[in-house]
Structures are given as structure tokens and as C-alpha cells.
Image (cartoon, rainbow, N blue to C red):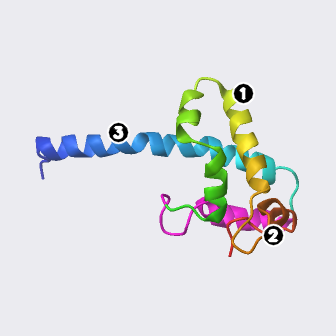
Amino acid sequence: MKASFPSVISMVLVFVAAAPVLFALPPIDKEWKERYIEKNPPPAYKEDAATQKCNVCHEPGGKKAKNEYGKAVGKHLKKADIDALKGNPPAMKKLIQDALEKAESEKNEKGEKFGDIMKNGKLPGSK
């Protein structure tokens, strides 16, 4: 089956449009893991984080909808800022780590600070 020229162009445009979203996530995930997973957390926390993956910050079933924790991080971290620092890994690291630190003091709908939730061995986006 041959693909028509318009369908090939459509596929390329979809990929190009999605590329900035796809490439914005790995630095955040990497820095989150460095901050919260590589510092010897309880084994169950590490396993939960490995299982939940994107759902630490996003609602299950879609990466566009952020959970409460993802929204808290997003208040302090904008995609445009990440994009502007792509050629400067140390500055990007600082930007992301600062946003994660600020999100720790944000509270969920129950009034619990995300930092306290994580210190108690639970993932911040869990309900």
C-alpha cells in the first residue's frame, strides 16, 4: 500500500509539532530522579516511582493533563525557559532543581505539602 503525498506530509507535521513536547520531558524526569530517587529513598518509594513513571506529575492515561504535583512544578517551570537553556545543561539543571524545590512547599487539595508527602515515602501525585 502506497502512502499518498498529503498523508506523508501530515505525518511529518504531526511529528514536528510533537517534537518540542517529547524533548522537553527527559530533562525534568532526569532531574526529578536525581533529586528524589538517587538519594537512597525507601525501596518501596523507588519501586512506586519506577512503576508510576510519568504519572508522578501527570494524570494516568495522558501526558497533557497534569496532576496536582505536576501543576505545582509547572507553576515554577515553563517550557519556554527549558527551551531557552537547551544548550546550557548546568543552567537547565539549576532551573529544574529550583522548580522542584519550590514545588515541595506547595500544598495539595488536602493541605499537605508535597515535600512532606515525599519525606513520608509517598509519591507526590498519589491520591
Residue at the spot 53% in from the left edge and 32% down from the top edge: 83
Determine whether 100 is above or below 54 in the image: above
- Identified by mark 2, the residue type is Ala
Q: Is residue 80 left or right of residue 77?
A: left
Residue at the spot 76% in from the left edge and 71% down from the top edge: 111
Residue extent of the magenta highlight = 42-64
Horizontal and vertical percent position of residue 27: 63, 41
Q: Earlier in the sequence, mark 2 or mark 3?
A: 3
Q: Are marks 2 and 1 in contact (CB under 8 Å)?
A: no
Horizontal and vertical percent position of residue 77: 63, 43
Q: Which residue is mark 2?
A: 44
Q: Main secondary structure of the magenta part?
A: helix
Q: Is residue 15 left or right of residue 52?
A: left
Q: Earlier in the sequence, mark 1 or mark 3?
A: 3
Task: Find residue 66 and report its image quarter.
Answer: bottom right
Binning the other alpha carbons within 10 Å of mark 2 as few (below 14), some (14 to 19) or many (20 upward) gives few
Q: Secondary structure at mark 2?
A: helix
